[in-house]
C-alpha cells in the first residue's frame, strides 16, 4: 500500500498556496500603487493650475502660494510616507481648497475638482477614505459658500450634493471591506493565511509520517506532530493496545482505520481546537492509518518470507529425523519465531492414551509455554473430527490442524498467536504435512 494520493494532494495544494494566498495582497499593492500615482497627479495638477492662474486680476496670490506650498509638502510626504492616507487626503483637500478660494471661491472654474478627493480616497483605504474624501470636499464647498456668500449660487451647492452622493455611492460599491473609523484585515487575507497554515500543516504531516520505518517511530512522530498542531499533550494508539503520550485522559479523538487491526486513534487532551486544527489532525490521522497499515503489511510479508525460508530449510531435515527430537523442536521454534506465534506444539495420544503435548516450541520471549486444558480439548476435537479448528482467545487465535500418520496415529499441530490470517494457516498446513510425512516415514 502506497500513500501517493496524499502526496498528489499536497503537491496540488502547493501550487494553490503559491497563487491564492497572495492574490489579495497583490490587488492591494496595485490599488496602493494606483493611489500613489493618482495623488501625485492631483498635486501636480494643483501646481500647474496655480502657475497658470498666477497674475490674474481676481486671483488671491497669497492663497494661491499657500496652496502651492501645501501641494509641494503633500508630494514630499507621499514619497517619504510620514503621514497616514487620511492625513494625505487632508493635505490634498487643503491644497484644492486654497486653489479654489484663490481663483474665485464659489465662482472658481476649478470647483468640480473637489470630486477628485472621493476617487483618491477609494484608491487609498477603500470605503473609509472614500467617505473621508467626500466629507472633506463637502466641508470645503460649504466653507466657500460661507466665505464668499454674495457670489455663491446653486452651482456650489449642486457640487456639494454631488460630492456627498459620489462618496456614498463609492462606499456602498466597495462594501464592508474596511470600516469607517478603523481598517480591519480583509477576509480574503484571513482566508489566505488560514489556507497557507493548513497546507503547511499537511506538508509537515506527510513529511513526518512518510519516513517512519517502524510502528514505534510512527507513534512517536505522530504524537509530536499532534502536539505541534494542537499545542497540547496528545496520545497516539495504532490499534495494537500500545500508545505514546499521556493515556487515560479525555479529549478530542480522531480515529483512523488500520489494516487487519483495531481502529487507531489520536487523542488531544485538555484544549479547545479551532477548525483548522481539527482538519489538520484529521489529515494526520488519515496519514497515520495508511502508514500503519503499510508497515503492518510489510511486517507480515517479512514474517511469511522468513517462515517460507524456514520451511525450505526444514524440508529435508524433517524427512531425515526419526522422531520428535531436538532437531524438529528447533525447526518448530524457528517457524514460530518467524510467524511471531506465542507457541507451536505437536499434540497426540500419550502413554495413558490421553491427548497431551508431545512437543512445544516457544515463538516469543517469555515464560515456558503451557497448554491449558481447554486448548487440549479443542485439539482433541480436531483430531477426532479430522477437521481444522480455529478458536479465538482474546487478541490471539488457537489453530488446531490434524495430521494423519501411517498406521492411523492421530496427531495435531497446534499454534497460538496471529493464526487467523489465511497465509499463516496455509504455512502451518504445509508444515503439518511435511511433519506428518517425516514422522510417518520414520
Image (cartoon, rainbow, N blue to C red):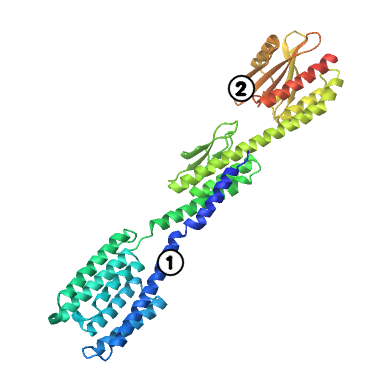
Relative to 400, is 173 above or below?
below
Residue pointed to by mark 2: 393
Left or right: 44 as drawn, with respect to 55: right
Question: Residue at 28% across / 89% down in the picture?
Answer: 54
Q: Where is residue 236 in the image (x, y as percent from the top left)?
A: 55, 40
Q: How crowded is mark 1: few (under 14 residues within 10 Å), some or many (20 or more)?
A: few
Q: Do the residues labelled 1 and 2 touch (CB within 8 Å)?
A: no
Can residue 224 be seen by looking at this rendering? Answer: no
**Judging from the image, what secondary structure is the residue with disc 1 in?**
helix
User: Which residue is outermost to the left?
Assistant: 150
Q: What's the residue at 75%, 22% (across, down)?
A: 430
Q: In this rendering, does residue 126 appear at all?
A: yes
The percent coordinates of residue 166 (x first, y second) are: 26, 66
Percent coordinates x, y for residue 83 in the rendering: 36, 75
Compared across the picture, whether 118 is left or right of 290 comes to left
Q: Where is residue 423 in the image (x, y as percent from the top left)?
A: 69, 26
Describe the element under mark 2 as helix, strand or loop.
Answer: strand
Nearer to us of marks 1 and 2 is: 1
Image position of 80 with respect to 21: above or below: below
Left or right: residue 391 compared with residue 41: right
Number of callouts: 2
Image quarter in which the N terminus is found = top right
Residues at marks 1 and 2, CA–CA distance in whole angstroms: 69 Å
Q: Name the residue at 35% across, 71% down.
A: 85
Residue that badge 1 annotates:
29
In the depicted view, which residue is nearer to us: 394 or 194? Answer: 194
Q: Of the residues under marks 1 and 2, which one precedes in the sequence? A: 1
Q: In this view, does 289 lie above or below 400?
A: below
Q: Quadrant of residue 210?
A: top right
Does 121 appear above or below 441? below
Amino acid at each position: 500500500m502506497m500513500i501517493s494520493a496524499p502526496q498528489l494532494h499536497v503537491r496540488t495544494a502547493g501550487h494553490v498556496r503559491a497563487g491564492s494566498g497572495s492574490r489579495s495582497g497583490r490587488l492591494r499593492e496595485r490599488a496602493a500603487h494606483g493611489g500613489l500615482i493618482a495623488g501625485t497627479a492631483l498635486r501636480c495638477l494643483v501646481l500647474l493650475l496655480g502657475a497658470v492662474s498666477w497674475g490674474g486680476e481676481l486671483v488671491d496670490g497669497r492663497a494661491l502660494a499657500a496652496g502651492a506650498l501645501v501641494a509641494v509638502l503633500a508630494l514630499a510626504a507621499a514619497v517619504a510616507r510620514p503621514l497616514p492616507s487620511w492625513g494625505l487626503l487632508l493635505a490634498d483637500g487643503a491644497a484644492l481648497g486654497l486653489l479654489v478660494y484663490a481663483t474665485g471661491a464659489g465662482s472658481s472654474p476649478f470647483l468640480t475638482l473637489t470630486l477628485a478627493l472621493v476617487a483618491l480616497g477609494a484608491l487609498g483605504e477603500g470605503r473609509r477614505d472614500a467617505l473621508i474624501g467626500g466629507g472633506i470636499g463637502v466641508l470645503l464647498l460649504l466653507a466657500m459658500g460661507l466665505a464668499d456668500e454674495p457670489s455663491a449660487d446653486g452651482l456650489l451647492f449642486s457640487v456639494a450634493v454631488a460630492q456627498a452622493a459620489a462618496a456614498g455611492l463609492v462606499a456602498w460599491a466597495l462594501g464592508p471591506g474596511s470600516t469607517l473609523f478603523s481598517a480591519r484585515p480583509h477576509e480574503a487575507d484571513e482566508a489566505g493565511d488560514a489556507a497557507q497554515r493548513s497546507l503547511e500543516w499537511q506538508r509537515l504531516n506527510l513529511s513526518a509520517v512518510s519516513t517512519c520505518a517502524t510502528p514505534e517511530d510512527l507513534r512517536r512522530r505522530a504524537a509530536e506532530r499532534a502536539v505541534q498542531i494542537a499545542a497540547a499533550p496528545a496520545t497516539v494508539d495504532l490499534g495494537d493496545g500500545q500508545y505514546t503520550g499521556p493515556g487515560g485522559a479525555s479529549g478530542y479523538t480522531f480515529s483512523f482505520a488500520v489494516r487487519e487491526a483495531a481502529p487507531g486513534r489520536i487523542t488531544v487532551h485538555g484544549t479547545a481546537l479551532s477548525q483548522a486544527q481539527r482538519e489538520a489532525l484529521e489529515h494526520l490521522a488519515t496519514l497515520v492509518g495508511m502508514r500503519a497499515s503499510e508497515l503492518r503489511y510489510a511486517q507480515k510479508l517479512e514474517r511469511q518470507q522468513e517462515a517460507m525460508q524456514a520451511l525450505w530449510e526444514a524440508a529435508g531435515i524433517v524427512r531425515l529425523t526419526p522422531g520428535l527430537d531436538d532437531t524438529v523442536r528447533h525447526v518448530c521454534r524457528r517457524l514460530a519465531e518467524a510467524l511471531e506465534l506465542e507457541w507451536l506444539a505437536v499434540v497426540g495420544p500419550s502413554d495413558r492414551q490421553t491427548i497431551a503435548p508431545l512437543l512445544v516450541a516457544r515463538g516469543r520471549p517469555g515464560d515456558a509455554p503451557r497448554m491449558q486444558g481447554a486448548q487440549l480439548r479443542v485439539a482433541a476435537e480436531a483430531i477426532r473430527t479430522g477437521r481444522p479448528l480455529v478458536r479465538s482467545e482474546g487478541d490471539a487465535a488457537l489453530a488446531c490442524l490434524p495430521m494423519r500418520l501411517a498406521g492411523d496415529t492421530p496427531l495435531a499441530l497446534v499454534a497460538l498467536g496471529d493464526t487467523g490470517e489465511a497465509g499463516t494457516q496455509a504455512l502451518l498446513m504445509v508444515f503439518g504435512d511435511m511433519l506428518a510425512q517425516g514422522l510417518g516415514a520414520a
